[in-house]
Amino acid sequence: MGEFTGVLHVHSTFSDGAMSLPEIRDWAAGENLDFVCVTDHSDALRDGGIEAYISACEQISNEVLLVPGVEFSGLGRHVIALATPDVLMDLTDDTVVHCPELVRERGGLTIWAHPAQTYAVSMRNAINAAYDGWEIWNVKVDGDHPNLVLAGLLERMERERSILPFRGLDLHRLPSSEIPMPRTTIHVDELSIETVVDSFRRGSYLMPDEREWGARHEADGHLSRKISSLSARIRHSIVRARCSTAITLHHALKPLKLTR
């Protein structure tokens, strides 16, 4: 059984990314990655765009596997869907956002992307939705550190149902400097779209210690990185209030169970 490492949530020129798929592949090879889950936006892949997108990912993959995924939107939130190409081509915003259980029934999975950008007014509904996982660290939104507020919220919600934690780059352009690299490792006999999706669905993956990046930054002492760390902590404080409101509403507004 082999060990393969990759990253989740990268955008290409098929939607609002600045990197072409070959550029993403070459960048990933330079980072010693085995796979990249490309997740371009659904609104840019309509009118036949999804077929061209999936085909291009398959053709360009060589030493790095480009796993085609799609970031769908609706109800004020974004949801990533990963599935085999035949399933992915049939998915819509309504299906993924409103009925994630249908995606799972067909062998795919859904991930609530950058929950910190979901406002409290719609966060409760997203919490109740049956998404397979939450992106508890989105480098673009959360900065250099995982969103500990969301991680804590997920831990509390897991008492009610299983929710998988994921970490993504939300990368739109070639990094001009060193950035956090939230890698995910899977152990499979052969690397393929099917084995990546299946490993994620089953929760059979490993993520390096999320504290390593923060500890390295504090030791490094560069002012720009200290500012980046501070801004991430400020964002965490802001989203803490939204999460607290959402979880309070979640418990307070649950339907009452009638007893005889």
Image (cartoon, rainbow, N blue to C red):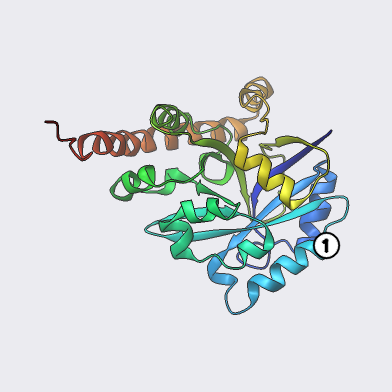
Q: Is residue 205 left or right of residue 43?
A: right
**Which residue corresponds to the image point at 65% horizontal and 28% vertical from the top-left?**
213
The answer to whether residue 205 is above or below residue 99 is: above
Question: Looking at the rendering, in which quadrant would you find the N terminus?
Answer: top right
Where residue 224 sits, quadrant-wise, is: top right
Residue 14 at x, y = what percent?
Answer: 66, 68
**Which residue corresponds to the image point at 67% horizontal and 44% vertical from the top-left?**
198
The answer to whether residue 39 is above or below residue 214 is: below
Please state which of residues 208 and 107 is positioned toward the viewer in this rendering: 107
Please state which of residues 35 and 210 is positioned toward the viewer in this rendering: 35
Q: Is residue 2 left or right of residue 199?
A: right
Q: Say what amino acid the circle numbered 1 marks.
A: Ile
- Residue furthest toward the right? 63
Where residue 46 sits, quadrant-wise, is: bottom right
- The residue where tag 1 is placed is 60
Residue 47 at x, y = what percent?
Answer: 59, 79
How many marks are shown on the rendered structure? 1
Task: Please say whether residue 176 is visible from this viewpoint.
Answer: no
- Residue furthest toward the front? 260
**Which residue corresponds to the image point at 50% horizontal and 53% vertical from the top-left?**
79
Please state which of residues 260 and 58 is positioned toward the viewer in this rendering: 260
**Which residue corresponds to the image point at 70% horizontal and 36% vertical from the top-left?**
183
The answer to whether residue 197 is above or below residue 47 is: above
